[in-house]
Image (spheres, rainbow, N blue to C red):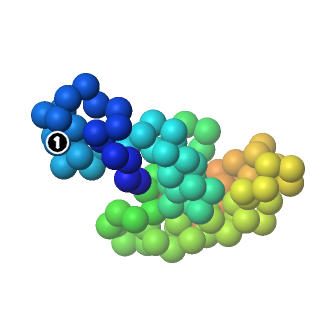
Amino acid sequence: MEDDTYEYCEGSEEAEWRGEGETWAVGDFFEELKGQFRGLRFVPLSSRKVVRAYKNGPLGYDDMLEGVREIYWRFGWPDEGRYDKEGCLSAVAEFLEERYPEFKP
């Protein structure tokens, strides 16, 4: 995200270090984060555990993530009107228990 730091900073010194530091406006940051969740780049494995889809993981990690993503899509993700959260999380827990117990939260 790009904002002109000179528009909102107190002085040029602050604007310079903020401009060089890859800062984001708060609203833009959270919109990007929501997009990452909608696209399942962050994948919830339970109501309390979320994993990153773009990290290197142990053997089977990518296959496990793809299986969990498919479950989310089957349960209507990311359409809030169709998404069945309880059913989805239950299916994810069952999938992990049966096929990938090493990744179970």
Q: Give the residue drawn at x 53%, y 66%.
A: 65
x and y percentages locating residue 60 in the rendered image: 43, 72
89 relative position to 63: left or right: right
Q: Give the residue drawn at x 20%, y 29%.
A: 11
Residue 97 seen from this side: no
Q: Which residue ends up furthest to the right in the rendered image? A: 81
Instruction: Determine which quarter of the picture holds residue 24.
Output: top left
Is 55 located above or below residue 29 in the figure?
below
The crowding category of the residue bearing disc 1, from other C-alpha atoms within 10 Å (few below 14, some 14 to 19, many at least 20), is few
Q: Give the residue drawn at x 23%, y 46%.
A: 19
Instruction: Determine which quarter of the picture holds residue 52.
Output: bottom left
27 relative position to 94: left or right: left
Q: Which residue ends up furthest to the left in the rendered image? A: 13
Q: Which residue ends up furthest to the top in the rendered image? A: 10
41 relative position to 56: left or right: right
Residue 8 seen from this side: yes
* Amino acid on which the number 1 mark rests in the picture: Glu
Foreground: 84 or 98?
84
Q: Which residue is mark 1?
A: 16
x and y percentages locating residue 82 in the rendered image: 86, 54
Is 28 located above or below residue 94 in the figure?
above
x and y percentages locating residue 91 in the rendered image: 73, 55
